[in-house]
Image (cartoon, rainbow, N blue to C red):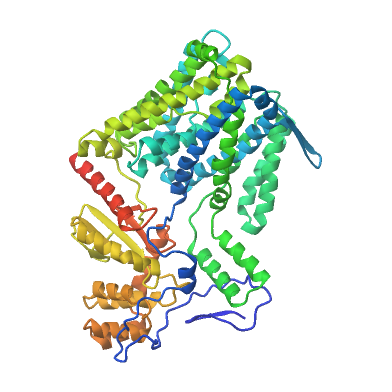
Amino acid sequence: MYTTTSAGIRQGAPTPTAMQKVTAMPTPMRTAMPTPTAMADGTAGAAGPARPAAASAAMPMTMSAESLSPLRAFLRTESASARILVGAVLLALLWANLGPGGYAAFWGWHLAVRVGPLAASLDLRDWVNSGLMTLFFLVVGLEARREFDLGELRERRRLILPAVAGLAGMLVPVLIYLAVNRTGGGAGGWGVAMSSDTALALGVFSVVGRGVPDRIRVFILTVFVIDDVVSLVVIAAAYSRHIDFGALVVAVIAYAGVLATTRLPHPRRKPLFAALAVTVWAALLAGGIDPVVAGLAVGLATSASAPRRDALEEATTLVRLFREQPSPELASEATRGLAGALSANARLQHTFHRVSSYLIVPLFALANAGIAVTPHALRLALTAPISIGIFLGFVLGKPLAVFGAAWAVARFGRGTVRPPVGWGAVLGGGTISGVGFTVSLLIADLAFTGPALAEAKLGVLAAALGAFLVSMLTFRLIGLLPGPARTRALLGTGRQLSDLETPVDPARDHVRGPADAAVTVVEYGDFECPWTQMAAPTARELLARHGDIRYVWRHLPLHDVHPRAQLAAEAAEAAGAQGRFWPMHDLLLAHQDALNLDDLVGHGVRLGLDVDRFRADLLRGRFAGRVAQDVESADRSGVAGTPTFFVNDRRHEGPQDLVALGRAIGEARDQAAALATA
């Protein structure tokens, strides 16, 4: 059988089922094991750190490689896909104007699909709008749930301001639209003027907001999430006809089943979850409600969580078992273990996000943006109440509503609720939210036909262009402000949510830099991790360049992949007890191939430690509890890998090179300066 020892996993006779959990955690070797690179006098050899061969062969070992958080990946994908979306819009316009008959005939072609007793017959445009777009709204629901569980909205009070701003940003444009269309037949299309387009708006932001902090993107996305959720509810409630309550009962029962599957383990949940989700979609379609609502509902029901340490260690064990004895059974179990270490939310986002952004949304644009643009049609659109109402609702109503609602909440909340960004960023977010497309065209197709539909589509396209120009002007004006004023306009002076659950304690933590530094950088590291080693020069360079940085090291030995890291961490603590923590820290990272007991004792000799005391501390495990405290603090802060950095208590996402960390530190310094001068 496979067992765990102090040296890791030892191979014996294979077990009948390899999925037996290995609960024992490898402990550090505390017996003398000289390595080939150790010098005769016990000091570390001159050989550089030994990186795992598989790692060096499989991936470029560079700290500038992107390591994207779910939110950053979401924003990056949405921004990039906006370019494809714009291309699809232009292609649809060309197709509709150069071959209008072919465009209408193609998207009007009917396609029937039958699965057992269930059958649906829709034209291609409806298959895109009601079928494929369900996956787009699934991604929206997944991201909303992720923000509720792990993001800015995990502190529920922070939901108040973006929720109010998002709702006001929908209500005011609707009122403006109805004021313009109080007579005539356009009043029924009020829903067209209310919803922002997440993908296109984030694409606009990537152009007009270059260089602005990521926090502003997060605020804008939060407002969009509220917008998308309410828009789908409006579609279901106001733009659905011929309701079949029997089918809706089936949808409710199937959705209850979706919620119940969250208690099942990953391998058993997947097929049942998929079958129930499809049942919800089909029942809503049969019930007369636009089935895209199913995507949002299923996404909101899929919880998000950070990977747990025990799940990651079990996955590592399964991969190691497969490496030692390759077999189809072990490969299957290792795959399930790796997938099961992630939340269902993360797995579904990974599966559908890029497909949704790069294929489904552009396909939706291609199917719906084809409008015959003639001089006569443009003249009618310039004077048509439908087009004017949509344009004014988005370009004027959205920014006024978002800014005004946020100001009212902050004003009447007596300071208890403030925007997480500055007021300039709130205004910029309002102007960007005036970019509507996807849901607007979806509602327009439900509310209008004929010339009125063409007027609505032209109004949506004109509003998107107008919102882009107004947003560019807004951020250009903010950029002209003096430094401190610009920082306050973008970042504000409100309290930021802390990601670091255990505050820095100078009496316990290992700190480099001034105690009153404006910026504190906390690193969770592993002395045997090659990524941590490559981050070490970055940390030293940051301290050398900036005199107002306080750098803190915390231990996170990854026992399952780095069996010598625990003993190395204890060695650093034992050296710290003799006043030599940082020299030992630097020496350990410089010689990752020399971390056995004799190597560590040799490091102690090199640093002039009391070697007998140092060796005794290591053999007794005197500082194992101190290392465990750091590991516990990492678990509370959701840290699962090394190195992980926190800048002024906010987790740093993305590259860990000098440029990226320097940018994050500059933002934190500007924020601190803005708070000091507020």
Q: Residue furthest bottom?
A: 40
Question: Residue 257, position in %: x, y?
Answer: 67, 46
Question: Residue 498, position in %: x, y?
Answer: 34, 50
Q: Residue furthest front?
A: 98
Q: Residue at x 32, y 32 (%)?
A: 475
The number of discs equals: 0
In the displayed structure, 307 sits above or below 609; it is above
In the displayed structure, 173 sits above or below 420; it is above
Q: Nearer the viewer, residue 366 or 203?
A: 366
Give the quarter of the figure containing the N terminus.
bottom right
Question: Residue 643, position in %: x, y?
Answer: 38, 63
Q: Residue at x 62, y 23 (%)?
A: 446
Q: Quadrant of residue 674?
A: top left
Left or right: residue 104 compared with residue 635: right
Q: Nearer the viewer, residue 158 or 349?
A: 349
Question: Is residue 7 visible to the viewer in this orientation of the structure?
Answer: yes
Q: Residue furthest top?
A: 183
Q: Residue at x 34, y 58 (%)?
A: 657
Q: Quadrant of residue 527?
A: bottom left
Give the quarter of the figure containing the C terminus.
top left
Q: Nearer the viewer, residue 242 or 136?
A: 136
Q: Residue furthest right?
A: 117
Left or right: residue 526 compared with residue 478: right
Q: Residue at x 34, y 84 (%)?
A: 599
Question: Is residue 296 visible to the viewer in this orientation of the structure?
Answer: no
Question: Residue 235, position in %: x, y?
Answer: 59, 27
In the displayed structure, 41 sits above or below 333; it is below
